Amino acid sequence: MSVRTITVLGSTGSVGRSTLDLLSRAPADWSVHALTANRDAEGLAAQARAVGAERAVVADEAAYSALKAALSGTGIEAAAGHAALCEAASADNDIVLAAIVGAAGLGPTLAAVERGTNVAIANKETLVCAGDIVTAAARRSGALLLPVDSEHNAIFQCFDHDHPERVTRIIVTASGGPFRNSSEAEMRAATVAQACKHPVWSMGAKISVDSATLMNKGLELIEAHHLFPVRADQLEVVVHPQSVIHSLVEYIDGSVLAQLGTPDMRTPIAYCLAWPERMATPSERLDLAKIGSLTFEAPDLLRFPALQLAMDALRAGGSAPCVLNAANEVAVAAFIAGQVGFLDIAAIVGDTLDEIDAPDCVTLADVMAVDAAARRAAAQATGRRLT
Ligand code: NDP
């Protein structure tokens, strides 16, 4: 591979750290333009020094002086704020890896797409709240969206991109999360630590809670709808607790293609980084005989109403997914802060969807307005449920 320039948005997070692990294994192949974080200035500066980044950017301007001090004497430029994030994303990169958590990733991710840079996208909330805008920008600029999410990466690898009409169904697998076999009473009393203890994957707090409510799977259905030319009714979820099959694509002749692997995010990240080639990773190899059996079950939409809400938002269209996402971000933050219970998360999202109009959004400003209105309504719904 010739030397390629990369910017990693959200480098201090779980996906960001896995990405840097891969880059550091082949330093001669990569030139790091910028790394970004929200406010972890120390962690970001250490990463920037380790990979020799040109620039390090914190979103939170209050963290700028700490970043500047930590980079003093290194020659690495420090910057802060939303505009600086967008500037790093729209610089002359060969690829941008988008791993900011939440709708906060939308602006910088869109900036990279508009520039025409290929984006390895982990930041699913960006596609959930503004998928039409981001994919239209990609068509205009020629940017390719390479899915990092393991399920979408599996679909991308199995999908016949030249003949999408031959695909009849996409089956997205779900581990079922830590409460797959829990009673409603157990879920009502669930702690943050229990919700974040994912049975298979090690991830950031927000996506771990989303996996526990199954909202993550709902967000992924919406993400899949934007990444692949399929209708909402062609998307299905199956619970597969071993997380060995990462998703499946069914064709008109009944053939079903699947991608398998051990649950290690470095595999789908490496696929995106090396595309259209392949690169080696240290991921544990799959040993099917050791695993023994793979099991499957239908998701329980009654015990996990968040998945039903997301499926309804996908079918409703307009900005319903944006409302769903914003409300979920507010509710999950309140749960993590100990303000509401686990079952309140889906209830807050449901209340917000009932309350907010979800008009079609044409511009980014439209999306931001709906997002802000949904956050206000979700904060009020949260206030009514404070523990
Ligand atoms: P983490 O919470 O571990 O990391 C989030 C990153 O985003 C950090 O670098 C954080 O900086 C930064 N960040 C947080 N808030 C802001 C903000 N307001 N503005 C700018 N940057 C911000 O998340 P994950 O790595 O787990 O997930 C990242 C994305 O990837 C999510 O969209 C998630 O759904 C998706 N994803 C994650 C997977 C995983 O295995 N973790 C798998 C598939 C998808 P700081 O450190 O300073 O807070």
Image: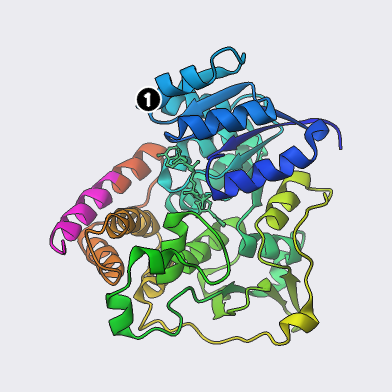
Local SS, label 1: helix
Q: Position of residue 286 (x, y in %)?
A: 77, 71
> In the image, is residue 188 part of the stretch drawn in magenta?
no
Quadrant of the image containing the C terminus: bottom left
Is residue 387 shown left or right of residue 126? Answer: left
Give the position of the N terminus as an image quadrant: top right
- The amino acid pointed to by label 1 is Glu
Question: What's drawn in magenta, residue-wise?
Answer: 372-387
Is residue 380 visible to us here? Answer: yes
Q: Could you tell me what secondary structure mostly forms the magenta stretch? A: helix
Where is residue 202? Give x, y as percent.
55, 60
Give residue 89's quadrant in the image.
Answer: top right
Q: Is residue 380 magenta?
A: yes
In this rendered view, identify the residue nearer to me: 39 or 8: 39
Residue 141: image quadrant is top right
Residue 345 location, quadrant = bottom left
- Give the number of marks: 1
Residue annotated with mark 1? 61
Residue 288 horizontal/vertical position (percent): 78, 79
Q: Which residue is nearer to you in this view: 237 or 225?
A: 237
Left or right relative to 378: residue 322: right
Residue 133 against residue 387 in the figure, above or below: above
Horizontal arrangement in the rendering, residue 115 relative to residue 132 (left or right): right
User: Which residue is found at the position 54% from the left and 19% from the top?
Assistant: 71
Residue depicted at 53% across the width and 59% down the height: 223
Vertical side of 181 occupied by 99: above or below? above
- 35 displayed left or right of 250: left
Q: Visible in this render: residue 89?
A: no
Residue at x 44% of width, y 85% of height: 181
Residue farthest toward the left in the current orientation of the protein: 384
